[in-house]
């Protein structure tokens, strides 16, 4: 992975394969692990299908929850990343396409 510091970035981090963009110069391990989970998701799905799925699922969740933050936290890719980003060993044991099981689980933040 390549980490790029972008001071004007809105969120703390963003995965844009093969890069991780970070707002702060010294990102913590949880944030980097979160973004690495997204890089793995992007590798598995393909970059364009990942972003298409991400946007479409966001729009569906936005209609479902009528709130930006709740919709964002319910996207299956975010559910998987937030549920496992503190486990720094997660990517070593993660199953292929593991994000699929977060499509149906209700893991409200
Ligand atoms: Zn995320």
Image: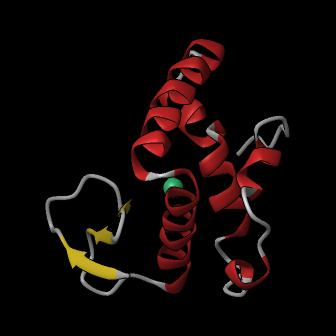
Q: Is residue 53 above or below residue 40?
A: above
Percent from the top left, x then y, of residue 103? 76, 37
Q: Residue at x 55, y 69 (%)?
A: 34
Q: Quadrant of residue 6?
A: bottom left
Q: Is residue 82 above or below residue 65?
A: below
Q: Is residue 98 above or below residue 31?
A: above
Q: Quadrant of the N terminus?
A: bottom left
Q: Is residue 20 left or right of residue 89?
A: left
**Residue 54 or 14: which is nearer the viewer?**
54
Q: How is the image coloured?
A: secondary structure
Percent from the top left, x then y, of residue 13? 37, 64
Percent from the top left, x then y, of residue 69? 52, 35
Q: Is residue 31 left or right of residue 61?
A: left
Percent from the top left, x then y, of residue 92? 72, 85
Q: Residue at x 63, y 61 (%)?
A: 81
Q: Residue at x 54, y 37 (%)?
A: 72
Q: Is residue 50 left or right of residue 21?
A: right
Count numbered badges in the picture.
Answer: 0
**Residue 100 or 80: which is nearer the viewer?**
100
**Residue 86 or 80: which is nearer the viewer?**
80
Q: Residue at x 85, y 40 (%)?
A: 105
């Amino acid at each position: 992975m390549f980490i790029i510091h972008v001071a004007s970035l809105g969120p703390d981090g963003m995965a844009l394969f093969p890069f991780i963009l970070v707002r702060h110069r010294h990102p913590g391990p949880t944030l980097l692990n979160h973004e690495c989970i997204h890089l793995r998701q992007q590798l598995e799905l393909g970059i364009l299908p990942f972003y298409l799925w991400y946007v479409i699922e966001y729009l569906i969740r936005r209609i479902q929850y009528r709130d930006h933050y709740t919709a964002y936290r319910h996207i299956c890719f975010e559910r998987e990343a937030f549920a496992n980003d503190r486990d720094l060993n997660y990517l070593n044991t993660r199953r292929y396409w593991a994000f699929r099981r977060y499509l149906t689980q209700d893991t409200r933040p």
